[in-house]
Amino acid sequence: MTKPEKAGKTKVFEQVLPLVLEIIPGQAAEGLIDVYEPGSYEEKPLRELCKMTLNEKNWSIEDQQILEDVNRQLAGGRLICRGRAIEGTALDQGVVEETEAGERYLYVSIRAIKPQEGGSLPSRPVVQAPRTRGGDRDGATGKETAGPRLPEMPRRAAATHRAQEGGVRGSGPRSREGCTVRK
């Protein structure tokens, strides 16, 4: 199969191609496929073509299940094409592809996406910084700080002191002297 190329109005008008419209529910791999005859879709908005496809009644059992999944996603969701809301015509969003037999067609992939469930943004922060009293100010910037400064911990000095006393294990490279090797 050849590399897909973006369809342009002039190219498609020169070679009138059939349209293959696929509406995919959520993150599924396969969707509902509808084929439009050449010349029947050029001036219609992509949104209208999607509505026509979703309103068809003569689907197989497998396609009816996909249609139910699409409608479930559209309850509170929307149709997107190439990561954006569908706009324009199929000629604007389509990609020219070729079958194994060498027949060219215009392909448009649409996803029915529902917002992720289970979470919501809180109306206020979950954790709030404590209010300052007395107007503590940062010496470098002069801005008001969130609270009293924490004392600096002399970590390196404490670690060095423990190492000198021998209380820290594994503080240096190990040698193999005195180790027994099991075979």
Image: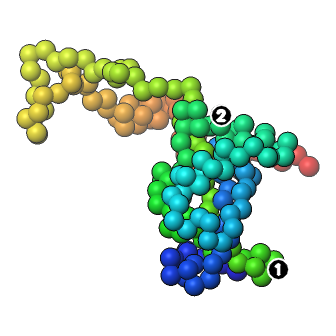
Q: Residue at x 31, y 29 (%)?
A: 153
Q: How many marks?
A: 2
Q: Which residue is mark 2?
A: 72
- Judge by depth and name the residue closer to the eye, 39 or 67: 39
Determine the residue positioned at 59% across, 55% down. Answer: 49
Secondary structure at badge 2 equals: helix
Which comes before the other along the chain, label 2 or label 1?
Answer: 2
Q: Nearer the viewer, residue 135 or 168?
A: 135
Q: Position of residue 38 (x, y in %)?
A: 66, 72
Q: Visible in this render: residue 124?
A: yes
Image quarter in which the N terminus is found: bottom right
In the picture, measured across the screen, residue 160 lies left or right of residue 29, that is: left
Q: Three-letter amino acid code at disc 2?
A: Arg
* 158 on left or right of 141: right
Mark 1 Cα shell of 10 Å, populated few (<14), some (14-19), many (≥20): few
For the rendered model, the colour scheme is: rainbow
Q: Residue furthest front?
A: 40
- Give the residue type that dot 1 points to: Ala
Identify the secondary structure beneath mark 1: loop
Q: Quadrant of residue 76?
A: top right
Q: Which residue is mark 1?
A: 101
Name above or below for residue 1 compared with residue 79. Answer: below
From the top left corner, tell me how far across and down residue 28 is, in percent: 71, 47
Quarter of the figure with residue 138 = top left
Q: Report how far apart the C-alphas of labels 2 and 1 lie in the structure.
A: 36 Å
Residue in the image at 62% along x and 83% along y: 15
Q: Answer whether residue 27 is visible to the viewer in this image.
A: no
* Residue 129 place in picture, x, y as percent: 27, 21
Q: Residue furthest top?
A: 133
Q: Which mark is residue 18?
A: none
| Residue 151 percent location from the top left of the image | 25, 25
